[in-house]
Image: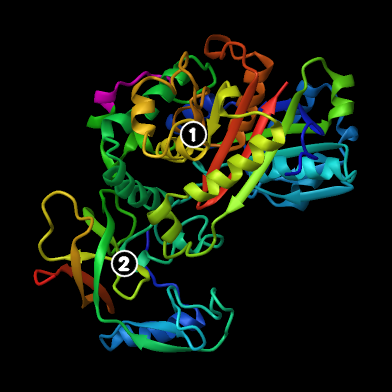
């Protein structure tokens, strides 16, 4: 398989907004001071400062799906020789591809989302994402709506088939909250127990409130640069060692790949590609950052990428492997469940911070490689970051 | 909040016309006979664009189910269920289980399709099939 995208690009700058402070202000009844474009702008200025470069060095721009590309470039004063719009995972892949192709050398990736103050609905009559994923809206006549319900339906069957218990699933929310309690930036820092988890309300049964991501405002930005230039810029550039993607589109709306195979074939195909490209295996990974709109993404990814055998994730989690200090600390910032729901963008910068070794109390020791994984409606993506 | 609405593409319209008359028909590829759900313009197996509509027997098996405890639609006060059913013809549909609910797991239970009035439209629901 191709390894041409390995070590051609590196992250040299990261930035994000004050989501903890903004969340508290919103809870106190204050109006949001920044819209999605403003949040992305603030994150961008911080990423630029972290990289120690000037705005005029940026020659490529990728904008997240929640802000318009042209306006974003206009407010930031960026005329780009290459640009695009993408979600977090594809933004990193596309920046890497553009740098490899020589279409850009310094790419800014910016994302802003005022989903809480802007009252975005992820289910119901105007469910966000319905224009992209038919399964989000097609079954509404039977009251079936929201990405959470899709995962609840999938996981109900998975639990019966594998014997994974609610108590074992609760390990995800508990472990991520523990990590968040050591992250001064996390929105939710109060530790919880498995008993708290089991006592929390159901949203869409079998999933509890603590299985669901937060909904909060925020912005994230990254500066990605050619590896050669990055090594001259700073001593600790974080290299992109591998990328991979596989999409299960067939039967997507009738939920066939969700309900019969739990997206496992897509993750296994991506695993082969991304580990081969990076020249490492699951045993070399120090920490995993897994897209967690819902807790059940974690056991599915653990199995899909070979951290444990299919059907073994419940036991793997119960044995403490995903906690800080365990074999594979997962979502060490608190992730979407406890740090901030930045639709995968926050996971990229946590991977960078762990590799840099700047995570303070939640730092994973000797962090060499971090594996980012997501599956959103059967679109499996992976990125491996490292020194 | 708002009410639930069916997605109504050109191809969906024919299916919903059937449902209005108390019959679920699925689109069948005229070339390779593959059934498709949701309806669409082309066969994902053989890429033929010719199709016809065939009625289903109305029996199937529950693949999975959920219970909603949060309100998402004006016309669905919680708690309510949604079920994924694999029709005996092959495709998976979402519906609601009406009547008696099984004790314990619903997965693998045999169901039979029926038609109900829901807030001004006719649609399908499923009921546990005692005979099955």
Magenta stretch prevailing secondary structure: loop
Q: Is residue A380 visible?
A: yes
* Segment tinted magenta in the rendering: A189-196
Indicate how the structure is coloured in the image.
rainbow
Looking at the image, residue B55 sits to the left or right of residue A328; the answer is left
Dividing the picture into quadrants, the one containing residue A108 is: top right
Q: Position of residue A293 (x, y in %)?
A: 46, 41
Looking at the image, residue A9 sits to the left or right of residue A193; the answer is right
Disc ID at residue A61: none
Q: Work out whether residue A243 or residue B10 is closer to the camera in this orientation and state it.
A: A243
**Residues at discs 2 and 1 in contact (Cβ within 8 Å):** no
- Identify residue for label 1: A336
Q: Position of residue A204 (x, y in %)?
A: 30, 47
Q: How many marks?
A: 2
Q: Residues within 10 Å of mark 2 (few under 14, many from 20)?
A: many
* Magenta-colored stretch includes residue A69: no
Secondary element at tag 1? helix
Q: Residue at x 56, y 78 (%)?
A: B46
Q: Chain of mark 1?
A: A
Q: Work out whether residue A356 or residue B92 is closer to the camera in this orientation and state it.
A: B92
Q: Position of residue A238 (x, y in %)?
A: 74, 24
Disc ID at residue B86: 2
Q: Work out whether residue A213 or residue A257 is closer to the camera in this orientation and state it.
A: A257
Q: Residues within 10 Å of mark 1 (few under 14, many from 20)?
A: many
Q: Chain of mark 2?
A: B
Question: Mark 2 vs mark 1: same chain?
Answer: no
Q: Residue at x 61, y 39 (%)?
A: A382
Looking at the image, residue B62 sits to the left or right of residue A100; the answer is left
Q: Is residue A39 visible?
A: no
């Amino acid at each position: 398989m191709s390894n041409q995208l390995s070590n051609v690009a590196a992250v040299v700058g990261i930035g994000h907004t004050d989501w903890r402070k903004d969340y508290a202000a919103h809870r106190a009844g204050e109006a949001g001071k920044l819209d999605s474009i403003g949040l992305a702008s603030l994150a961008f200025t911080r990423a630029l400062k972290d990289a120690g470069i000037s705005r005029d060095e940026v020659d490529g721009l990728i904008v997240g799906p929640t802000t318009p590309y042209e306006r974003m470039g206009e407010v930031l004063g960026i005329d780009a020789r290459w640009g695009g719009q993408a979600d977090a995972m594809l933004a990193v892949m596309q920046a890497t591809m553009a740098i490899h192709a020589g279409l850009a050398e310094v790419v800014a990736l910016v994302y802003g989302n005022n989903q809480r103050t802007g009252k975005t609905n992820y289910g119901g009559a105007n469910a966000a994402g319905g224009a992209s994923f038919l399964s989000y809206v097609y079954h509404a006549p039977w009251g079936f709506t929201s990405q959470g319900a899709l995962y609840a339906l999938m996981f109900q069957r998975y639990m019966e088939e594998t014997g994974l218990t609610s108590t074992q699933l609760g390990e995800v929310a508990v472990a991520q909250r523990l990590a968040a309690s050591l992250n001064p930036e996390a929105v939710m820092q109060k530790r919880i127990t498995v008993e708290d988890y089991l006592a929390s309300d159901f949203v869409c049964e079998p999933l509890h409130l603590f299985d669901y991501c937060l909904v909060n405002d925020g912005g994230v930005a990254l500066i990605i640069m050619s590896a050669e230039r990055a090594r001259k810029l700073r001593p600790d550039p974080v290299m992109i060692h591998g990328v991979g993607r596989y999409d299960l589109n067939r039967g997507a709306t009738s939920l066939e790949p969700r309900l019969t195979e739990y997206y496992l074939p897509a993750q296994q195909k991506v695993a082969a590609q991304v580990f081969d490209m990076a020249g490492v295996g699951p045993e070399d990974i120090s920490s995993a950052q897994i897209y967690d709109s819902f807790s059940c993404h974690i056991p599915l990814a653990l199995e899909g990428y070979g951290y444990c055998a299919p059907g073994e994730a419940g036991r793997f989690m119960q044995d403490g492997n995903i906690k800080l200090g365990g074999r594979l600390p997962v979502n060490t910032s608190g992730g979407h469940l406890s740090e901030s729901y930045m639709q995968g963008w926050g996971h990229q910068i946590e991977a960078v911070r762990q590799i840099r070794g700047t995570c303070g109390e939640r730092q994973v020791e000797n962090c060499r490689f971090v594996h980012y994984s997501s599956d959103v409606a059967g679109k499996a993506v992976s990125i491996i970051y490292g020194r | 909040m708002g009410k639930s609405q069916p997605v109504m593409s050109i191809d969906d319209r024919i299916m919903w016309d059937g449902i209005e008359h108390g019959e679920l028909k699925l689109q069948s590829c005229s070339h390779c006979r593959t059934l498709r759900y949701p309806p669409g313009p082309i066969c994902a197996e053989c890429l033929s664009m010719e199709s016809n509509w065939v009625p289903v027997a109305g029996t199937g098996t529950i693949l999975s189910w959920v219970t909603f405890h949060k309100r998402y639609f004006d016309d669905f006060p919680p708690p309510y269920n949604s079920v994924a059913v694999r029709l005996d013809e092959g495709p998976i549909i979402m519906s609601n289980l009406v009547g008696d609910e099984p004790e314990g797991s619903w997965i693998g239970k045999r169901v039979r399709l029926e038609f109900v009035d829901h807030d001004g439209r006719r649609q399908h629901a499923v009921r546990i099939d005692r005979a099955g």
